[in-house]
Every structure is written in C-alpha cells, then in structure tokens.
Image (tube, rainbow, N blue to C red):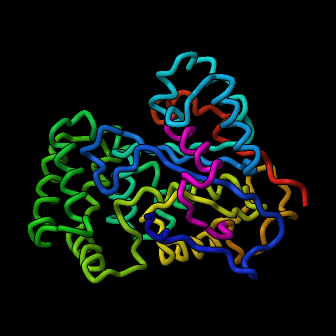
Amino acid sequence: MRSPLQGGLPPGGAVVVGAVVEIACDESGFSGTNLLHSSAPVITHASVDLAVDEAVALITALRSGFRFAPHELKSGRFLRGSGAREALEWFLAALAGRAHVHLIDKEFFLVTRIVDFLLTEPSYAAGTRLAREHHPAALALYEAGRPAGGDWGAFLSAFVDLVRMKRRLPVEQTVQRFFQARDALRRHGLGTVADAVLDGLGPSHVRAVVARLDVDDRTVPPPLEPLLPALAETVLSWSGGQRQVLVTHDEQSALTADRLTRLQRVLAVDGHPPSAGVDRAGALPNGVSPLAGLVMVDSRDDPRVQVADLLAGVARRMPDIIDDALRQPPPAPAL
C-alpha cells in the first residue's frame, strides 16, 4: 500500500497569469545531506515539456524499436543495453527543444552555500542566477581550495557538520572545528580572492546563522538541500521571464509546501525579468512568480516523469550530453 504523497504547492486559480508551460521533472544523484560521502559527485535535475501521450509514445518506441523491457528504462541498464548508443542518440534527438538539464557539482554547491550563508544574509535566491554577484568569490575559493587536498576536505566537512539540521553536535564544538579547518586551509595561501573569502568568515555571523537554524527559522533555506536552487534554475530557464511554469515532480521530501511558497515569493520579486533579447512587452507582470505551482506525483504513475528520470540519469552518467540543445528550453510563445 502506497503512502500518501507529501509536499508540493498546487496552483491557486488566482496565481496563473498569461502563458503557462507545464513541465515534468525528476533528479538523479540526490543523496540528501550526504553531499561529501556519496558515489555520485554530481546531481542532475531534468525537465521535459512533453504531454502525457507524447511521453507514452516515446517510452513505447524505446521498448518496441530498441527492445527495452520496462525495468530497463533506468539509466544504468539503458546505457548497458544492447544497441545503447543508437537508442541514446534517438532518445536525445526526440527530446531536442523539449528538455532542460541542470547539473550540480556537490562540492561546488557546498562552496556556494558557504559564501551565500556565511558571508551574506541567507536567502532562497542563494545558489541561483538571482544571486550571481557572489558566484565569482565562490568559484575562486573552489578552484584554489581543491588542490589543498585533506585540508580542503576537512573544511567542507566542517561546514556540513556546522549547518546540518539533524543529529548536530554541540554548537560551540562545530563552530570551533569550522574555524580550525578554515585556518588550516588559509595557511595554504590560496590567492587574493579566495583568502578574502576565508578571512571574511566572522565568528559572530556564523554563530548567528547557526542559532537561526537551531530555532527552525524558516526564512533561512535548508543549507544542504540542493533541489530547491535546482528547481529555481529549472523554472527560470523555462519561464524566460515571459511565462509561468507549472511543475509536475517526482515526490521529494525536500520540496515542502512551506519552502516552495517561500521560493515562489522570492521568484515573484526577483525572478521575472525577461531573458536578453526577449520583448519586455510580453514579460510577466511585477509580483507574479514564474513558479505557478508544483504537483507531486509517484513516478510510476506519470510517463512524463519517467522520461525526465531517464534523462536525468543519463546526463549524470554522461555529463557531456548536456549541450546547448538540452540546456535551453524552446523560447516562450509570443503573447
């Protein structure tokens, strides 16, 4: 007997304004807060804008034309199957202009969280294109820190322990360990920008953020949940600033109604400028979120999500397939 689906944010009648695109999403490589000790170093979040009958036809074609059994339509078996190369080429061609893949490097995600949470005010825009001003600092720290080996790993691990929302050690212990790891990494002399990031980590601000986590301050997004910024990026890509996006998503405990509501509000304020070269006359009105809503489903019941799941798994195992044709959804229709 299946458990009731949890989470989601069903759209309200007054929320939807103008053009709407419906997408189905799934991820691959998500390991909860286990971001450093996982066999999957990246997470992929895939989305397609197929109708149900189109998804059924695609899956049927894979099973009949390439002789894949139902249980083989998981990426691992799909890529090991007989005729996998030909099937993959056909699959990607069938999705050209109808799909988007967002890739997350787990280590880099942690670095963006360090910068976005411990140097600035935590926000649901963190880790997305809406907070790009912090990206150069995070990238500099990531590129300079990785060659530091064990001290780099210890620094990231100390951050995870610092902001973990469950089974945390005493605060003073985690804060002390974090700054000891920071100081050890700082001794490597990582360069002007990276060292400035490390020097900017102040104990008072760090303790203030941890204190907010301890009292379950829900204005602070979950620090170790990459699906929320991934979802935001997916929605922004499909919206293009001109249309709302209604999401159907495989069930994920991270996507609670409260978090989705907060993300929806942030996107309503900051997430509606049209893309470069797009007619501003067709832009979403101020205050209208590009996220129209999110409906949670069991992937076994929705062939569109099954297609997104297969695409996410293939892209995680073969990141080189994430080319421009897959990264960019088709342009919004003229209004």
Q: Which residues are magenta?
A: 291-313
Camera-side residue of 222 and 249: 249
Q: Residue furthest right?
A: 335
Residue at 16 percent of width and 59 percent of height:
178
Residue at 24 percent of width and 57 percent of height:
160
The image shows residue 267, relative to residue 196, as above or below, that is: below
Q: Is residue 107 left or right of residue 24?
A: left
Residue at 29 percent of width and 74 percent of height:
209
* Image quadrant in which you'd find residue 168: bottom left
| Residue 115, position as x, y percentages in the image | 36, 58
Camera-side residue of 253 and 139: 253
Q: Is residue 124 left or right of residue 11?
A: left
Number of marks in picture: 0
Q: Residue furthest front?
A: 1
Is 151 included in the stretch rendered in magenta?
no
| Residue 169, position as x, y percentages in the image | 12, 68
* Image quadrant in which you'd find residue 296: bottom right
Instruction: Quarter of the image for the C terminus: give it.
Output: bottom right
The image shows residue 103, relative to residue 4, as above or below, that is: above
Instruction: Quarter of the image for the N terminus: give it.
Output: bottom left
| Residue 204, position as x, y percentages in the image | 22, 75
Most common SS among magenta residues: helix
Residue at 68 percent of width and 55 percent of height:
23
Q: Is residue 13 left or right of residue 158?
A: right
| Residue 291, position as x, y percentages in the image | 65, 67
